[in-house]
Image (cartoon, rainbow, N blue to C red):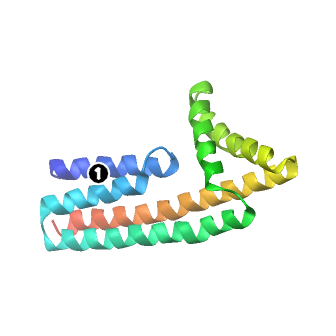
Amino acid sequence: MSAVEWIVAALMVVGLIGIVIPVLPGLLLILVGVVIWAFELQHEAAWWVMGISIALFLACMVLEFLIPGKRMRRAGVRTSTLVIGVLVAIVCAFLIPVVGALVGFPLGIYLVERGRRGGHAQAWSATKHALKAVGLNILIEGATAVIIIGLWVAAVIFWT
C-alpha cells in the first residue's frame, strides 16, 4: 500500500468513528478519502469508485432526510432539540468520563422536550422518537460507509 492509501485508510477509520460520534462528519470523511485516492491514482477504476461513492453518499443523505427525519417531524421533535442534545452530550462527556455523551444526549433531548411539552409522558415519548431516529441515521450511514469502504478496498486489492 502506498502512503496515500494509508492516509485514506486512516481517514476511513476516523470516518467510521465519526458516524457514531456526532461531532465528526463520518461519512463525509470517508468520501473525502476516496476522492483524494482517486485524484492521486488517476486510474479508470479509481474514477468509477469515486463516482459510485459520491452517488452512494448522496443517496444516503436523501434516505436520512426522508426516513428518520419524517418520523421525527411527525412526532413533533425539532432539529433544534437534537442540536441541544448534542451540546449537552459534549458537556456531559467532560463531566462524566466514558459514558457522559451517552447519558447527556438523551438527557438534553428530554429536558428540552419536557420544557416544551410540559409533561413527563410527552417528553419521554419525544425522546424515544428522537433516539430511534438517530439510531436509524447511524444505521443508514454505517451501511453506506461499509459499502463505500468495501468498494474502495476491492479497488485497491484488485485494480491497483
> Dot 1 surroundings within 10 Å: few (below 14), some, or many (20 or more)?
some
User: Is 9 situated left or right of 13 in this image?
Assistant: left
Element marked by disc 1: helix
Q: Can residue 99 be seen at all in this image of the molecule?
A: no
Q: Residue furthest front?
A: 116
Nearest the eye: 104 or 97 = 104
Q: Can residue 116 be seen at all in this image of the molecule?
A: yes
Tag 1: residue type? Ala
User: Is 116 situated left or right of 121 in this image?
Assistant: left
Name above or below for residue 84 compared with residue 39.
above
User: Is 110 situated left or right of 67 in this image?
Assistant: right
Residue 143: x %, y % from top left = 48, 64
Tell me what residue is drawn at x 17 percent, y 53 percent: 1
Name above or below for residue 128 compared with residue 68.
above
Name above or below for residue 74 compared with residue 116.
below
Residue 159: x %, y % from top left = 18, 69
Query: Which quadrant of the figure has residue 38?
Result: bottom left
Judging by the rendered image, the residue that carries numbered circle 1 is 9
Tell me what residue is drawn at x 12 percent, y 66 percent: 42
Nearest the eye: 55 or 113 = 113
Residue 53: x %, y % from top left = 33, 68
Q: How many marks?
A: 1
Query: Which quadrant of the figure has residue 32?
Result: bottom left
Residue 124: x %, y % from top left = 80, 50
Q: Quadrant of the C terminus?
A: bottom left
Q: Residue furthest top?
A: 95
Tell me what residue is drawn at x 61 percent, y 65 percent: 69
